Amino acid sequence: MLSGTALLAADHRAGTVFSLDGDSRHVVASDALLAEHAGFLVLPPEARDSWAFADDRGGALVVCGPDGIRRIPIAIPAEHLAASADGSQVVVTPGLGANDDAWNDVVTVVDLARDSSVRFRTRTGEPGVVIAPDRATGRPTIVLRHRDPGAIEAIPLASALDLGAHVPVLRGSVCDDLADDGHGDVVDHETGVVGVATGRGLERFAIDDGAPHALGVIPWPADGRAYYLRRASDTGNATGVLRGGPTNPSRWTEWTNVFAEIDLHSGAARTVPLPNGLVFRFALAQGIAATTVIHPDGDALVVIDRVRGRIARVVPLPPLGSPPHPGRMPWDGVDGRPAHRRAVAIDPRSGIIAVTAGGDGVIHLVDDEGGLTTIDMPDSLDEGGHLLWPAPPGRFTDPVGR
């Protein structure tokens, strides 16, 4: 059932990345623990590499290209990845790791052309990141999104690349007109517009002559807010799932979900209501989106027709062996076992959709008619793992790790 480009499946708890192509399955990276929040980063066609991820145990950016796998040192734990427009540089920002409080302030800038990296210190707090063009000068700029208090910080990429040793502090121009709860970032490399998901809405910024400034807030077009954004390459729009309902995470079975696609410039939006429950991440391809909804009444794959703005089909999924428990936070493990979720990816050529069953060690493949094929994996895919179906050159290159 698999065809076209190979499907990548990462078991980030086991530290293994597999490639599935036709009937073959082989390991492409071992002893490399993919940073779950940062995910896979697809690099643009002009880059000599194909994709990358942060190894959150070994402290390296793992980069795959025609010449094989390379490892370039980075600071860990890693929380976010973002690439420059040409894919020659990647910025890695720090996360919590196995800690309850924000403590790490080290940002890494990787120069893929030179197989080298530099590091600098910023503000603690798991900053988000994109690389955006300065609209006045055209120079690539590192844009950090800070929380508590909210701020947008602009640092010229060249300034970071010119840094010396000993992890110096590097500060840039700051705009503090941002809500404190930012979570989710997109960038339009053509226009330089940056979008941030907050409780206030989709907040937009641009960098002009080194200084970030706010472009206004687009209110969310339905109840709730997005926490995870992706830029759709076919439309240039920001996409996300708006989570509404109870704010208490233990009541996740009551969460409402609405898929939204929003024009970063005009604010025009299209929404598609989804079933209640836990929606984690979603996948995009030409004209469609796909996500899973986890719920005690039954899990489902939901395929969204983005052109017509409606649900194309809902496919019931076999239940998880160890699903999230109602009344408990869905990302917390139970009885010493990790929490289990699902990852999803769309084959950009065939439209086949891959869905994992976290903890059960299987991947379900769903065709256009809802037919389901199951592939057994050698690892359990705890927490759902991560999936990536790289697009053909020139299509669906998202410059932020997903």
Image (cartoon, helix red, strand yellow):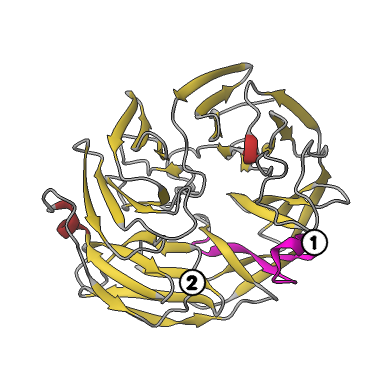
> Which numbered disc, 2 or 1, marks the residue that appears first in the sequence?
2
The disc at residue 264 is: 2
248 in the magenta segment? yes
Closest to the observer, 373 or 196: 196
User: Left or right: 3 with respect to 372?
Assistant: left
User: Left or right: 69 with respect to 252?
Assistant: left
Residue found at x 54% / y 25% = 18
The amino acid pointed to by label 1 is Asn
| Bounds of the magenta segment | 235-257
Q: Position of residue 299 (x, y in %)?
A: 81, 47
Residue found at x 68% / y 50% = 290
- Is label 2 in a helix, a strand or a loop? loop
The disc at residue 276 is: 1
Closest to the camera, between mark 2 and mark 1, is: 1
Closest to the observer, 289 or 295: 295
Q: State the image quarter where residue 56 is shown.
A: top left
Q: Position of residue 81 (x, y in %)?
A: 39, 50
> Can you say which quadrant of the picture contains the N terminus?
top right
The amino acid pointed to by label 2 is Leu
Q: Is residue 330 above or below residue 344?
A: below
325 in the magenta segment? no
Proximity of marks 2 and 1: CB atoms separated by less than 8 Å: no
Q: State the image quarter where residue 252 is shown.
A: bottom right
Q: Position of residue 202 (x, y in %)?
A: 52, 74
**Crowdedness near tag 2: few (<14), some (14–19) or many (≥20) residues, C-alpha within 10 Å:** many
Closest to the observer, 257 or 330: 330
Instruction: Determine the CA span between mark 2 and mark 1.
Output: 27 Å
Residue found at x 37% / y 75% = 151
Q: Position of residue 224 (x, y in %)?
A: 67, 73
